[in-house]
């Protein structure tokens, strides 16, 4: 159920292989009934925080459509996919001629995932439709997530959405739909998913064979995960709990001890192959700052709320510049920590 820009976290099940979904029964019922009605929209924007099951739902619905190509004969609910069926096996192996999964590609030179979905990836969709135009089958494209489309890729997708091929279905995933081109959003039917409840998150982790013991650590993970399976996995399997604790210690420290703590945390986060936990840290500080801004506003301190809100925007901009120009990660982290601590 965990998705993170096309990459699969340690301990997670790839969404195309996952036969269980937790906490989104109403969304499943809506999709099944809407499809059965024969009035299904050609593009559905599945939006919500990262790691709550958007990609799993998309593949689940795609499996449903391809297994029941005649809407009138389709069930009025989404059943757990039969992983031994021909449709499921083709989807799982990436061999389905009727489903295209667009995500950030891997750079052949570095072996690392690129920072964006490029226009070359979107051109695959054009080829996909041309290759399958005479089959009469449904043709489904999952964009995972659309937030990662660069400008050229977004414009290329928009052109296809403006004149969609017959019997085509676009499942557009987004963690932050406000960042998408308004013209893309306007051509999609929005379907918002909420973070998982504590009960559903516990069941989802149990499906991944992660049994929480009910102790304080488990309670802290559930509280910090924000209803996201991917956040829970980062806390449990990537040292996220220790990162949160180190960050809290920095905020509580002063003088030289605070500076030493900043360097220790920056050394960990800037280590080789620590992209996942670095991304987790960036998400955490963004959430921390937004919470501070909200608390200040509720307390009537609008000046402080405005200052922190501006810092949120500055932090995001500096992170974007740092990643875009491949700047020294440790110095970026130290600079962010110093500003937040102040």
Image (tube, rainbow, N blue to C red):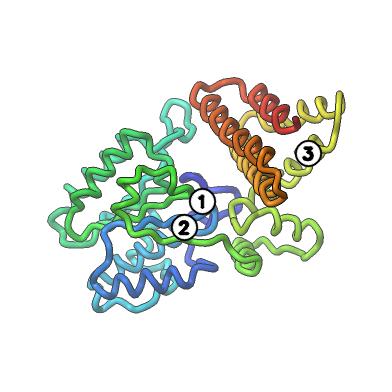
Is residue 277 in view from this perspective?
no
* Residue plotted at (63% across, 56% down): 226
> Badge 3: how crowded within 10 Å, few (<14), some, or many (20+)?
some
Q: Specify the quadrant of the image occupied by residue 308.
A: top right
Marks 2 and 1, how far apart at CA: 8 Å
Q: Which residue is mark 2?
A: 54
Left/right placement of residue 173 relative to residue 223 reads left
Looking at marks 3 and 1 on the same chain, the residue that comes earlier in the sequence is marked by 1
- Picture coordinates of residue 156, whole percent (x, y): 26, 39
Looking at marks 2 and 1 on the same chain, the residue that comes earlier in the sequence is marked by 1
- Judge depth for marks 3 and 1 and give the one in front: 3
Element type at mark 3: helix
- Depth check: 314 or 222 in front? 314
- Picture coordinates of residue 167, whole percent (x, y): 20, 60
> Badge 2: how crowded within 10 Å, few (<14), some, or many (20+)?
many
Q: Specify the quadrant of the image occupied by residue 166.
A: bottom left
Q: Which mark is residue 246?
A: 3
Left/right placement of residue 242 relative to residue 206 reads right
Q: Which mark is residue 3?
A: 1
Placement of 263 over or under 138, stated as above or below: above
């Amino acid at each position: 159920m965990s998705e993170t820009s096309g990459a699969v976290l340690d301990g997670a099940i790839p969404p195309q292989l996952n036969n269980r979904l937790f906490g989104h029964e109403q969304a499943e019922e809506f999709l099944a009934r809407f499809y059965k009605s024969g009035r299904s929209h050609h593009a559905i924007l599945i939006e919500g925080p990262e790691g709550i099951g958007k990609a799993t739902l998309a593949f689940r619905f795609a499996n449903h459509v391809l297994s029941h190509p005649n809407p009138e004969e389709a069930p009025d609910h989404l059943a757990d996919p039969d992983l031994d069926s021909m449709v499921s096996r083709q989807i799982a192996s990436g061999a389905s001629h009727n489903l295209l999964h667009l995500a950030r590609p891997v750079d052949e030179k570095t072996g690392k995932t690129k920072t964006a979905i490029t226009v070359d990836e979107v051109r695959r969709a054009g080829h996909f439709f041309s290759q399958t135009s005479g089959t009469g089958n449904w043709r489904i494209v999952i964009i995972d997530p659309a937030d990662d489309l660069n400008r050229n890729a977004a414009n290329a997708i928009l052109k296809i959405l403006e004149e969609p091929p017959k019997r085509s279905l676009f499942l557009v995933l987004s963690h932050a739909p406000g960042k998408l081109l308004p013209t893309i959003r306007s051509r999609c039917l929005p379907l918002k998913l909420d973070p998982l409840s504590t009960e559903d998150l516990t069941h989802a982790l149990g499906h991944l064979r992660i049994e929480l013991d009910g102790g304080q650590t488990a309670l802290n993970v559930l509280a910090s995960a924000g209803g996201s399976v991917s956040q829970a996995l980062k806390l449990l399997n990537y040292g996220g709990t220790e990162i949160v604790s180190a960050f809290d210690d920095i905020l509580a420290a002063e003088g030289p001890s605070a500076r030493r703590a900043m360097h220790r945390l920056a050394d960990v986060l800037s280590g080789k192959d620590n992209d996942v936990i670095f991304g987790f840290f960036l998400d955490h500080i963004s959430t921390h700052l937004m919470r501070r801004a909200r608390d200040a506003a509720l307390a009537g301190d609008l000046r402080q709320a405005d200052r922190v809100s501006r810092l949120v925007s500055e932090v995001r901009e500096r992170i974007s510049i740092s990643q875009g120009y491949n700047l020294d990660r440790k110095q970026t982290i130290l600079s962010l920590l110093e500003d937040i601590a102040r």
